Image: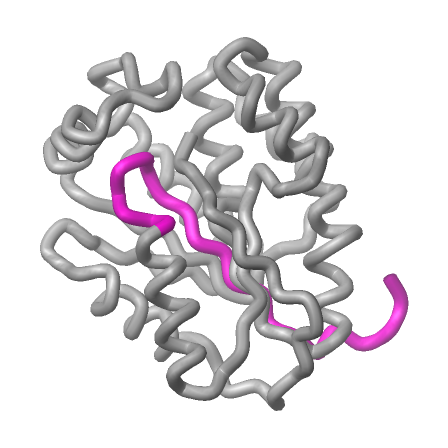
Amino acid sequence: MTGERTGWFVTIDGPSGVGKSTTVQALHDHLAAQGRPARRTVEPTTSDLGQFTRSHANRIHGLALACLVAANRYEHIDTVIDPALHAGELIISDRYLPSTLVLQQLDGVPLDFLLALNDRVVLPDLAVVLTADPGLIAERIATRGATHRFHLDPTAPSREVDLYGDAAAHLMSRGVEVLLLETSHATPSDVARRIADAIPALPIASITSPTHPTPQEP
């Protein structure tokens, strides 16, 4: 898309059970209370391709799933993210590139393949990576029940925490501002305030068709 990019792009990622989606909602509410409208979106998206990807993630594995996730991301960029940024909007995505660099590696996909596959994605202005004690994450997953095949691996929470640290380092090496937040003893509202403080004030843009998904953590 041509033209000046005047909006601001925030992504929020973290291990399953870290409270990510709750934090995204709290952030959206906090910004709204400040009179700072934000467009909320999610990956996999609510498009036909995104819904197919989400509903088949337990049956499609490895390289094939990585390609589906990347295809949905490029669609997301073309149809939602780029238009919002060129319209001067603040857009917040629940999951983005860091989730790919973690979950697809857990699924056996080599890092170099993932980096090449996502080489042309739009990078965020601020990448928020939430983390927590792996034992606490495992307790939360056990309490709510496994919703994805990755949850069946008892070592997954610890591996996810480590891989998200690696993903944060990768984004920083590419010049992305990264906010790494330990959330074990913080409420979603506390975390939301810290994220909001890191987002600059933008001219108020008109958001004509905000996205209000009800994401489910894979």
Image quadrant assignment for residue 3: bottom right
- In the visual, does 172 lie left or right of 151? right
Image quadrant assignment for residue 151: top left
Q: Nearer the viewer, residue 165 or 40?
A: 40
> What colouring method underlies this structural image?
one colour
- Residue 24 appears in the figure: yes
Q: Nearer the viewer, residue 155 or 33?
A: 33
Question: Residue 21: where, in percent of width, then height?
Answer: 37, 49
Residue occupying the point 69% across, 40% down: 47
Q: Quadrant of the N terminus?
A: bottom right
- In the visual, does 130 lie left or right of 75? left
Q: Quadrant of the C terminus?
A: top left
Q: Nearer the viewer, residue 178 or 187?
A: 187
Extreme residue toward the right, this view:
2
Q: Nearer the viewer, residue 50 or 168?
A: 50
Question: Residue 193: where, in percent of width, then height?
Answer: 29, 74
Q: How many marks?
A: 0
- In magenta, the rendered stretch is 1-21
Question: Residue 201: where, in percent of width, then height?
Answer: 50, 87
Q: Is residue 206 above or below residue 26?
A: below
Q: Is residue 214 above or below residue 84?
A: above
Residue occupying the point 17% across, 28% down: 138
Question: Residue 178: where, in percent of width, then height?
Answer: 42, 60
- Residue 113 appears in the figure: no
| Residue 5, magenta (yes or no) | yes
| Residue 181, magenta (yes or no) | no
